Amino acid sequence: MGKILMLPGDGIGTEVMAEVRRIIDWYGTQRGFDVTIDEDLVGGCAYDEHGQAISDAAMEKAHQSDAVMLGAVGGPQWDGVAYDVRPEAGLLRLRGELGLFANLRPAICFAALADASSLKRDIIEGLDILIVRELTGGVYFGEPRGIEDLGDGQRRGVNTQVYETYEIERIARVAGDLAMKRDKRLASAEKRNVMESGLLWNEEVTRVIGNEFPELELEHVLADNCAMQLVRNPKQYDVLVTDNLFGDLLSDVAAMLTGSLGMLPSAALGAADSEGRSKAMYEPVHGSAPDIAGQGIANPIATIMSFAMALRYSFNRGQDADLLEAAVTHVLDKGIRCGDIMQPGMEKVGTVGMSDAILASLNELQEQYS
Ligand code: IPM
Ligand code: MG
């Protein structure tokens, strides 16, 4: 039996995760998906309870799980909290200690939502890119870091951008594998024009892809140019591999191309063990959205689609994942929308209404996926 740890976190995290639970229950009763679900705190709520953004006990549960489903962390009430215990530290500890170095962030534009994007329809219609973000290295984890008092009324803030060969190698391999299963095109973004770490990134990616994936078409792009290209002509990319910080920025850009941050799932995966299983955490790309928290209007689709990724990558249930993705598409095709993707003439629903509609579509479509 599989084990899922749910960490709903803060803000809308708790609301959207409650809907995922209903979807998991449906897979339990209808499709024989046998899992035990445990739940714990992460983020600001964990800080309030334990003085830490995630407790050791919750970390231990995460280590014992096949998949962690995370909602969102953070909120303005924790803005003044120190970095090592603030809500985001919980996320970083999970990523770091579980060794989740490969972050898969697909940006897919649903046909029904092409008009919800701030870009013209023809630029984003049919968009399907996959950002592969390095997640446990770079400036997020580099040492030294901190704020130093220079004693003369001046202070010095330091973070370190650092990558070693093995870190670039393993993320290049993940990206190469995925690109081979898709369009056999891989773009790699860095800033080799100003950063040594970018030059190393460029050289190691070139070497790994050249040696191990000779069939792939590899393109190198400077990260700032890449941001511009994503807005100008995003469909030129298929798989895009990049470091932790640039991946954070570029995935937000890519996300917005699709119409709404409320739609995009992500998976963070570790290295496979001897049995081929890897640690994994699934979370929506959006944040805790404190401005709409508690109102029952948050869009649960990104979190539900993250569960689809869990079905695919952690539970080896590709067909069940296809079914869930089809059910979401079906709901959108029917004109059902949450507020963030609302368009004229469509039916507006809240968080619960959206998952009701997805559950109805699951019932409708499930026979086609057996
Ligand atoms: C993300 C988020 C996180 C990050 C924050 C919440 C720490 O922006 O997952 O993209 O910067 O990685
Ligand atoms: Mg981000």
Image: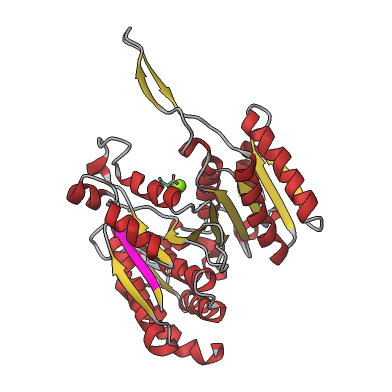
**Could you tell me which residue is drawn at 41 percent across and 55 percent down?**
286
Total numbered labels: 0
Q: Is residue 269 left or right of residue 46?
A: right
- Percent across and percent down for residue 126 are 63, 65
Q: Quadrant of residue 238?
A: bottom right
Residue 1 visible? The answer is yes
The residue segment tinted magenta is: 3-10
Q: Is residue 153 in the magenta section?
A: no
Residue 350 visible? The answer is no
Q: Is residue 4 in the magenta section?
A: yes
Tell which residue pokes out farthest to the top in this image.
152
- Quadrant containing the C terminus is bottom right
Tell which residue pokes out farthest to the right in this image.
214
Q: Is 82 in front, or is 298?
A: 82
- Quadrant containing the N terminus is bottom left
Q: Is 6 in front, or is 326?
A: 6
Q: Is residue 101 above or below residue 122?
A: above
- Percent across and percent down for residue 161 are 54, 32
